[in-house]
Image: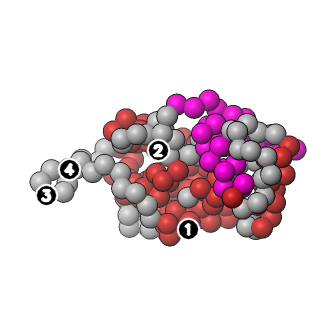
Amino acid sequence: MNKVGLGLAAAVIAIGGTSLAAASDPKGSYAIRGIGSQECQTLLQELEKDKNGSLSVASWILGYMTAANRYEPTTFDISPVTDVRALTNIALALCQKNPKARLETVLSDMLRAMARARVQADSPLVEMKSGNATAVVRQEVLLAIQQRLNQRGLLKAKPDGSYGPQTDAALKEYQKAETLPVTGVADAATLLRILV
């Protein structure tokens, strides 16, 4: 697991957050289907043998998130992160830290932490490019990032949900101050640090 994935995992664990809707029987039990029912250590061992298995994990994560989006009130997207690879890396990093937990439990905790920065309504996707770095975020998420940058005095322009040179520069200042990779775009590490 890369350093960014482990750092994001630590941030997600430390933060906690709002609760996702809980559905279960009277004893608090519910059925977990597919890969999510596996203990993390088993899943990680299987992924060591089959490098293509991460596609199945990513697909399961996306399905789980889709269900959360459907059933969580005032939620268009439970995660402000749109990068599937980043979401998968975060979940697998959390699995490494919690080998006895099921993938479903790890993902539930991860999404609970991210839920405070969820996208509440459909919002256009905005592509951010700075040098070789690119990231795609929803306009609502970019506006929230700009508001935080503005509050810190890093963005002088009025937050408007569009990406340009001033947002690029403010993100670079923020990333440098937070000892994140300086990309000028709202990659997963930056996005979670500033919003979650």
Say which of 169 and 50 sits in front: 169
Residue 80 image point, x, y percent: 56, 46
Residue shown at 38% from the left, 64% from the top: 101
Give amino acid for label 3: Lys
Q: Earlier in the sequence, mark 1 or mark 3?
A: 1
Disc on res. 78: 2
Left or right: 49 in relation to 184 = left
Quarter of the image with the N terminus in it: bottom right
Circle nearer the viewer, 1 or 2: 2
Camera-nearest residue between 103 and 178: 178
In the depicted structure, whether residue 176 falls above or below residue 72: below
Pointer 2 with pointer 4, Cβ within 8 A: no
What amino acid is found at the position of numbered circle 4 in the picture? Ser
Q: Which residues are magenta?
A: 122-150
Q: Secondary structure at mark 3?
A: loop
- The amino acid type of the residue labelled 2 equals Ile
Q: Residue at x 52, y 62 (%)?
A: 12
Q: Check the image and report above or below for 162 versus 186.
A: above
Observer able to see residue 44: no
Give the percent coordinates (x, y) of residue 169.
84, 51
* Residue 177 image offset from top left, x and y in percent: 77, 67
Residue with the mark numbered 1:
10
Cα–Cα span, label 2 and label 4: 20 Å
Q: Residues within 10 Å of mark 2 (few under 14, many from 20)?
A: many
Taking 157 as reference, is 4 left or right?
Answer: left
Q: In the rendered view, would you say 113 is above or below 97?
A: above
In the orientation shown, which residue stands out farthest toward the left? 26
Q: Which mark is residue 56?
A: none
Question: What's the residue type where badge 1 is placed?
Answer: Ala
Does dot 2 land on a helix, a strand or a loop?
loop
Q: Which residue is mark 3?
A: 27
